[in-house]
Amino acid sequence: MTDAAVPTTSADRWLRFEGLSNIRDVGGLPLVGGGYTRTGVLLRSESLDHVTPADVRQLVDGLGLRLVLDLRTNREIAERGETELARAGVETVQFSFIPESDRELPEVGDDVHPMVANYLGYLRDRGPNVVGAVRRLATSEGAALVHCAAGKDRTGTLVAMVLDAVGVEREAVVEDYALSATKIEAMFRRWTSLSGEEMPGPEEIDRHSPRAIAMEQVLATLDERDGGAAAWLQANGLTDDELDALRNRLV
């Protein structure tokens, strides 16, 4: 596992696995005032349902993975079953970000506002779980990986909160969030090849792609309403020591 603070391009942060498409390291991102986030500390990905034995070896032995933060619901987890990583003994902790019932998107005329409403809804409806996931990350050792289903919405929100809280430049936070858009088609190809369903068309794929403006609006709302992501986390239970520990791990 690398424990360096060096700049990276988006291409550098992508990781190659047999059973994963949307997995990357959030190391190498620029900090306000100078410096970079550490590599080899926080990974983000889609669901781990299809990791192979070779993937497990690469994650555990190669990258030093010790903790998985699973943001899915009980229903989602029950449908998919235990992952190869869990069977390999990697600690997995669930922090569901949405109610067990399906969340319906508000009826609006574009794709951005439903995303903003959903992301702020995670903080409103599952605030203790959001803080709990950040706390667990701050106090863990070794590499940690956070995922949901596609690794773009719930995972994107948590990672953006963490990056903003430790002082990553706003443009880089938003860029990391939006980067998952480049992997939506690859994830659909994997899912449909396994299920036998038809590949959706370009419009449907685009509808599921993260929009940079959505995360810009979420973070701007936190700035105006709460004083930023770090202030929101502290107002909802994260201690000064835990915030310092988070920064020490990632910066």
Image: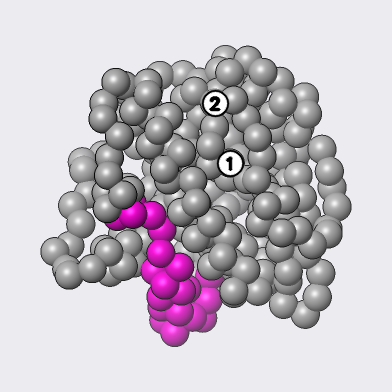
Q: Quadrant of the C terminus?
A: bottom right
Depicted 123 relative to depicted 171: above or below: above
Residue in the foreground of this view, choosing between 164 and 180: 180
Residue 23 got which mark?
Answer: 1
Q: Residue furthest left?
A: 107
Name the secondary structure under disc 1: loop
Residue 174 at x, y percent in the picture? 53, 67
Q: Quadrant of residue 200?
A: top left
**Disc 1 + disc 2, Cβ < 8 Å:** no
Residue 156 at x, y percent in the picture? 48, 55
Q: Amino acid at mark 2?
A: Gly
Task: Give the residues in magenta.
Answer: 206-230
Question: Image check: 185 left or right of 55?
Answer: left
Which residue is located at x 47 percent, y 34 percent?
47
Depicted 87 relative to depicted 176: above or below: above
Residue 19 got which mark?
Answer: 2
Query: Residue 38 in magenta?
Result: no
Residue in the foreground of this view, choosing between 231 and 188: 188
Residue in the foreground of this view, choosing between 5 and 184: 184
Q: Amino acid at mark 1?
A: Ile
Colour logic = one colour
Which residue is located at x 72 percent, y 51 percent?
12
Number of numbered labels in the structure image: 2
Q: Quadrant of residue 10?
A: bottom right
Which residue is located at x 59 percent, y 25 percent?
18
Which residue is located at x 26 percent, y 30 percent?
198
Residue 137 got which mark?
Answer: none
Residue 92 at x, y percent in the picture? 55, 30
Q: CA distance from mark 1 to mark 2?
A: 10 Å
Helix, strand or loop for the magenta stretch, by majority: helix
Q: Quadrant of residue 32?
A: bottom right
Q: Residue furthest front?
A: 202
